[in-house]
Image (cartoon, rainbow, N blue to C red):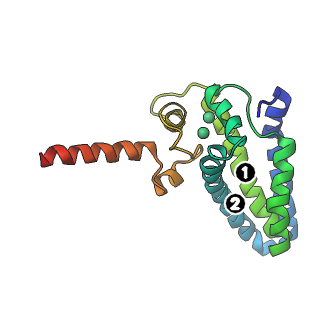
Amino acid sequence: MQLNRWNYYSGFVVYPAVILILSALALRAAPDVEWWRCASLLVVGVIAWTLAEYCLHRFVLHHVARIRDLHEAHHRDPQALIGLPTVVGAPVSFILLFAPLWWIGGVALACSLTAGFLLGYAWYLVVHHLLHHRPARKGSLFFALKRRHALHHHVTAEGNFGVTSGIWDRLFRTDIQTHRNAARKRAGTKLVAQ
Ligand SMILES: [Zn+2]
Ligand SMILES: [Zn+2]
């Protein structure tokens, strides 16, 4: 969805603020000795986000009618301020994630996991923005991420769905490099066999 500057950049402030509030609430709710449990759940939340990022991009943004049209607008114009408005994303994450987790496991679990998930999401917002708005130094990790995402934009939209990480693409064999290497290997094997 095309956003105005205020709506687009508000996510860079609102989500970190929510993460800090949730982390403070989790630590207050947990007994002193269990801070490490909150920290572990936060890490689990971040990992859960990377999987959600992959699945949402692969199965929702590229395949659900209307949402696909909005995402294609980003593919056509990567530098346009397109995204999910914070006024929609934040309440949705509370309804679909925080509330059920609170009901299942209590306030410390809900706050820790949601904080981790939103930390992953906030990191995604920053990384995806920089990928399209900042140059990268050749050989850097950022250059590798930028290249991965550029392949998704310009070579085939059926691969490299992970933006902040390529782990799930490699695991589910949608890594564009993997496809190419496999094709090269197959071609090489054929040549050797001939
Ligand atoms: Zn992009
Ligand atoms: Zn895409």
Of 37 and 33, nearer the camera is 37
- Nearest the viewer among 86 and 42 is 86
Residue under the point 83% across and 53% down: 92
Q: Is residue 140 above or below residue 117?
A: above
- In the picture of the structure, the residue carrying the numbered disc 2 is 45
Q: Looking at the image, which is closer to me, 168 or 192?
A: 192
In contact (CB < 8 Å): disc 2 and disc 1: yes
Please report the residue visible at 67 percent of the width from the left and 33 percent of the height from the top: 129
Residue extending furthest front?
65
Disc marking residue 81: none
Marking on residue 119: 1
Residue 183 image point, x, y percent: 32, 44
Q: What residue lies at 77% left-to-right and 74% top-to-bottom?
A: 33
- The answer to whether mark 1 is within 8 Å of ligand 1 is no
How far from the left and from the top, in percent, is residue 168?
A: 53, 54
Residue 184 image offset from top left, x and y in percent: 29, 42
Q: Earlier in the sequence, mark 2 or mark 1?
A: 2
* Left or right: where 182 falls relative to 135: left
